[in-house]
């Protein structure tokens, strides 16, 4: 590394070398003078004998390994000077690249956060995640969590894991009574050995002991997150031993997690961790721990030093026959996956979605590269005389190409730097697209992976869009270039520039058609009738049972709540339901209908259902077609079914008065309501029935305001506080905010593809306008001659417009063919519109043609305004 230190003292070394050569020449000169020559003859003879001193100095410096670095630095300085001399060109190229590179870096940042960021555990490569393989299911349902008995079986009988922990993948909303007022926090249930298996040491206090699952119920304890300690407890240094009242139970704080640890799953950011022994308190499900059919835990295992993942998989597979399964269930085989923020079974779906977005932004970058290449081609042709002079003076073609690529790399690196800044601004904006009611916390840091990606993509982009112009500009043709700089190209068309414009138009059309389909889908989704009112309704999810309410206390609480809410000014009706349509929860009951046998292999017919209180249909705006709704004096099992269930099981009949068995309980049908959407907005009509409210602990309060007057959330919150200040609504929102979740996929896809399409349109417009403008500038003399010979302005205008529109027509034709294939991947995301919708294809094509016509018109008008005499005089 001595040469590196010599770089900083190279001037001194150069001076020493020159002085040494001068002394050597002086010695030879004196030697020749002693042989009888005069001073002048001796100096000439010494120089002839010594050789070319300049060349010798260059050869000597090569020994010091500096010329390459100096040459590259000289290229960089020269390229920077050239770019400063052309600010319009530089700004146009850099801004185009900022948009393309910024879009790619932004999407990669999210891909990095979901697929590449390692979990915050020690030696993550030795940690695995354990789930069950459901042999009777496929897709997203092919893998499932563990039950607690299954977890203990695998924990106690495996031979390849030094420790197997378990945790609840979904943090639970919990009511924290803080100075007499309830606040909502999120807690995660973990096994006692969770932190030791993860290799996470608390910043303060201690972690759970390994036997906390068995002994923790007698002394409830929690670890709190570093963020909760900092922001909710004011970084209290005496927090260890402090008692927090959660869900009506006192928990002692025994530790604070380190600042870098939140969870081992993406989107999960609990405020505290409690042991599995506290599951009945946190979940209010006393059978959560003991039930063999309750699958809710994810396994976290650390391999023994000598064990491999394959050995661990084989070891756990042996235990599959010992796992409990129902009479109609397949064997649940334990499967292990490398521990990653997105569980292994779901990574493929995440990778497919982010890959789709990366393909879209890749097309945007392709347009930006074509745009930059076109501008560089035009610039290279105007500089061809300069390059010819340099080649005539001895510069090799490789040397000239390297100089041209240096300019391209400077432009792309500047675009990459601007793209990183754009990413920094866009990340919070994109995160804001997530509905606020979804308790998912996504962190997308700009880490070394993002910076490396941005640098490599920028460098690769610079080479891709710079190599063709560099090769074209350095082709041999010195005599022609030196003889006449302005006429070597004349009106000659460049197939490369035209091809790049066609590529831009093609890719732009694909993105615009995709965006058009998604935007139409979004509008269609918003106009789909979900079967209930989406205006003037407020929702509040409650769980008084989490505070220890008995069933009798819950019934009294809900009754008092409904009475007080219905008495609020502006409230038309109010009711309760255990599950809402288009929500994340679902309840399936097995029913028996006379004359309808169950599907093969099943004991009954599975139909979705919900438990609702009297007044539900009025509060939700669900139209009653026949019969009646529920009444408080219903004494026997009754049900209200939807129109699709009536059509399927009692076709052509009035189902009122008929009955079916819900489980083994005969249930009379008393009403029929319209069919709605229950799982997704795009689903086909599904049978559904409603049951009377079963006094469940967790329920959603539904409040309808009078016509045109939405109910006040603050008044509802105040009413809850008056009844019990410790009860905190887990979600309180208007029904329009509630609809953000089912519309999330359509909304996000529509916005992103629309943004990408607009960027692509802007870049393609710049590219087309630039090519036509350059063509006009190169053909100024030709146009002057034509007009001098009698061509009118309209003929010139038409000729220039034909040039631009011909390229546009070719690009649109290619884009339509490519869109027909590319948009098929969007079929699953579209509502009410096909991926090959001809109206969208036609409308977008006409829109792009109109924009292209406008972008060509201004250069064409400038060409038609050329003064023939001035053009010929300039020539």
Image (cartoon, rainbow, N blue to C red):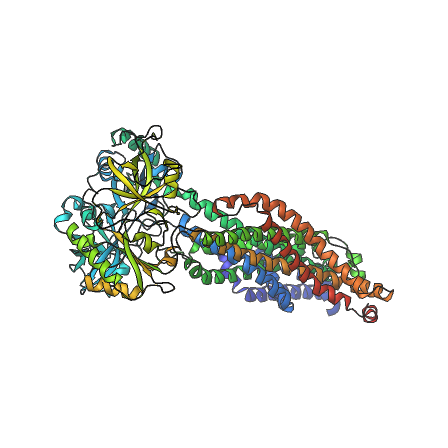
- Which image quadrant for residue 690? top left
Left or right side of 217 for 146 = right
On the question of residue 53 being in view, the answer is: no
Left or right side of 757 for 132 = left
Left or right side of 6 for 673 = left
Residue 747, given in percent of the width and then of the height, sits at 46, 54
Residue 237, given in percent of the width and then of the height, sits at 20, 64
Q: In the rendered view, would you say 447 is above or below 180?
A: above
Residue 381, given in percent of the width and then of the height, sits at 72, 59
Q: Nearer the viewer, residue 449 or 864?
A: 864
Name the quarter where the C terminus is drawn. Answer: bottom right
Q: Nearer the viewer, residue 124 or 213?
A: 213
- Farthest residue, direction right: 789
Q: In the rendered view, would you say 88 is above or below 335?
A: below
On the question of residue 707 being in view, the answer is: yes
The tally of labels here is 0
Residue 448, given in percent of the width and then of the height, sits at 43, 55
Left or right side of 154 for 343 = right
């Amino acid at each position: 590394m001595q040469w590196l230190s010599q770089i900083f003292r190279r001037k001194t070394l150069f001076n020493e070398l020159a002085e040494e050569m001068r002394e050597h020449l002086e010695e030879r000169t004196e030697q020749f003078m002693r042989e009888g020559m005069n001073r002048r003859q001796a100096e000439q003879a010494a120089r002839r004998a010594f050789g070319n001193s300049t060349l010798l100095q260059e050869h000597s410096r090569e020994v010091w390994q500096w010329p390459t670095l100096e040459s590259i630095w000289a290229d960089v300085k020269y390229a920077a000077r050239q770019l400063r001399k052309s600010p319009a060109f530089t700004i146009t190229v850099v801004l185009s690249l900022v948009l393309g590179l910024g879009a790619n870096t932004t999407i990669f940042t999210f891909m990095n956060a979901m697929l590449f960021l390692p979990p915050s555990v020690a030696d993550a490569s030795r940690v695995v995640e354990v789930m069950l393989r459901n042999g009777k299911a496929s897709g997203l349902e092919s893998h499932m969590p563990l039950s607690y008995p299954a977890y203990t079986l695998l924990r106690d009988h495996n031979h390849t894991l030094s420790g197997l922990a378990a945790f609840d993948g979904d943090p639970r909303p919990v009511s924290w009574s803080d100075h007499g007022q309830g606040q909502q926090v999120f807690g995660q249930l973990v096994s006692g050995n969770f932190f030791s298996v993860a290799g996470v040491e608390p910043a303060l206090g201690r972690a759970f002991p390994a036997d906390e699952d068995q002994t923790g119920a007698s002394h409830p304890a929690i670890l709190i997150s570093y963020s909760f300690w900092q922001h909710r407890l004011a970084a209290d240094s005496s927090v260890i031993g402090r008692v927090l009242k959660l869900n009506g139970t006192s928990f002692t704080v025994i530790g604070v997690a380190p600042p870098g640890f939140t969870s081992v799953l993406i989107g999960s950011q609990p405020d505290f961790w409690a042991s599995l022994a506290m599951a009945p308190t946190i979940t209010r499900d006393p059978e959560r721990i003991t039930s063999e059919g309750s699958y809710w835990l994810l396994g976290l295992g650390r391999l023994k030093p000598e064990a491999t993942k394959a050995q661990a998989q084989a070891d756990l597979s042996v235990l599959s026959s010992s796992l409990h399964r129902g009479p109609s269930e397949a064997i649940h085989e334990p499967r292990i996956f490398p521990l990653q923020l997105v569980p292994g079974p779901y990574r493929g779906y995440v990778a497919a979605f982010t890959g789709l977005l990366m393909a879209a932004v890749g097309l945007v970058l392709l347009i930006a590269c074509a745009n930059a290449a076109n501008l560089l081609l035009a610039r290279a042709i105007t500089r061809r005389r300069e390059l010819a002079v340099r080649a005539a003076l001895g510069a090799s073609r490789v040397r000239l190409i390297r100089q041209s690529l240096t300019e391209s790399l400077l432009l792309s690196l500047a675009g990459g730097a601007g793209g990183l800044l754009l990413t920094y601004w866009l990340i919070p904006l994109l995160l804001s697209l997530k509905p606020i009611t979804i308790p998912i916390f996504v962190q997308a840091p700009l880490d070394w992976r993002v910076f490396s990606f941005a640098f490599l993509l920028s460098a690769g982009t610079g080479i891709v869009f710079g190599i063709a112009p560099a090769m074209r500009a350095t082709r041999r043709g010195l005599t022609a270039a030196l003889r006449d700089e302005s006429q070597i190209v004349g009106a000659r068309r460049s197939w490369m520039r035209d091809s790049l414009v066609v590529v831009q138009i093609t890719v732009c059309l694909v993105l615009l058609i995709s965006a058009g389909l998604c935007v139409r889908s979004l509008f269609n989704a918003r106009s789909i009738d979900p079967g209930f009112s989406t205006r003037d309704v407020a929702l509040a999810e409650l769980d008084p049972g989490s505070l220890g309410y008995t069933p009798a206390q819950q019934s009294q609480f809900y009754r008092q709540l409904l009475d007080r809410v219905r008495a609020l000014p502006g409230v038309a009706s109010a009711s309760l339901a255990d599950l809402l349509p288009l929500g994340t929860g679902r309840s399936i009951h097995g029913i028996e209908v006379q004359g309808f046998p169950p599907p093969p292999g099943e004991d009954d017919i599975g139909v979705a259902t919900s438990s609702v209180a009297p007044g539900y249909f009025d509060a939700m705006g669900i139209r009653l077609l026949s019969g009646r709704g529920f009444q408080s004096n219903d004494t026997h099992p009754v049900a209200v079914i939807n129109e699709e269930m009536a059509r399927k099981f009692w076709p052509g009949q009035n189902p009122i008065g008929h009955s079916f068995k819900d489980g083994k309980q005969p249930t009379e049908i008393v009403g029929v309501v319209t069919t709605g959407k229950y799982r997704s907005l795009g689903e086909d009509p599904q049978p559904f029935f409603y049951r009377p409210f079963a006094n469940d602990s967790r329920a959603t309060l539904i409040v309808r305001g009078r016509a045109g007057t939405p109910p006040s959330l603050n008044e509802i919150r105040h009413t809850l506080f008056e009844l019990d200040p410790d009860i905190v609504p887990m979600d309180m929102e208007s029904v329009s905010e509630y609809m953000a979740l089912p519309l999330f996929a359509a909304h996000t896809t529509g916005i992103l593809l629309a943004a990408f399409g607009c960027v692509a349109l802007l870049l393609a417009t710049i590219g087309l306008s630039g090519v036509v403008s350059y063509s006009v500038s190169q053909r100024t003399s030709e146009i002057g001659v034509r007009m001098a010979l009698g061509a009118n302005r309209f003929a010139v205008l038409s000729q220039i417009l034909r040039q631009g529109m011909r390229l546009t027509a070719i690009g649109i034709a290619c884009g339509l063919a490519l869109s027909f294939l590319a948009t098929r991947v969007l079929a699953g995301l579209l509502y009410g519109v096909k991926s090959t919708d001809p109206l969208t294809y036609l409308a977008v094509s006409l829109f792009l043609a109109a924009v292209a016509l406008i972008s060509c018109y201004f250069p064409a008008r400038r060409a038609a305004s050329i003064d023939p005499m001035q053009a010929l005089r300039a020539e």
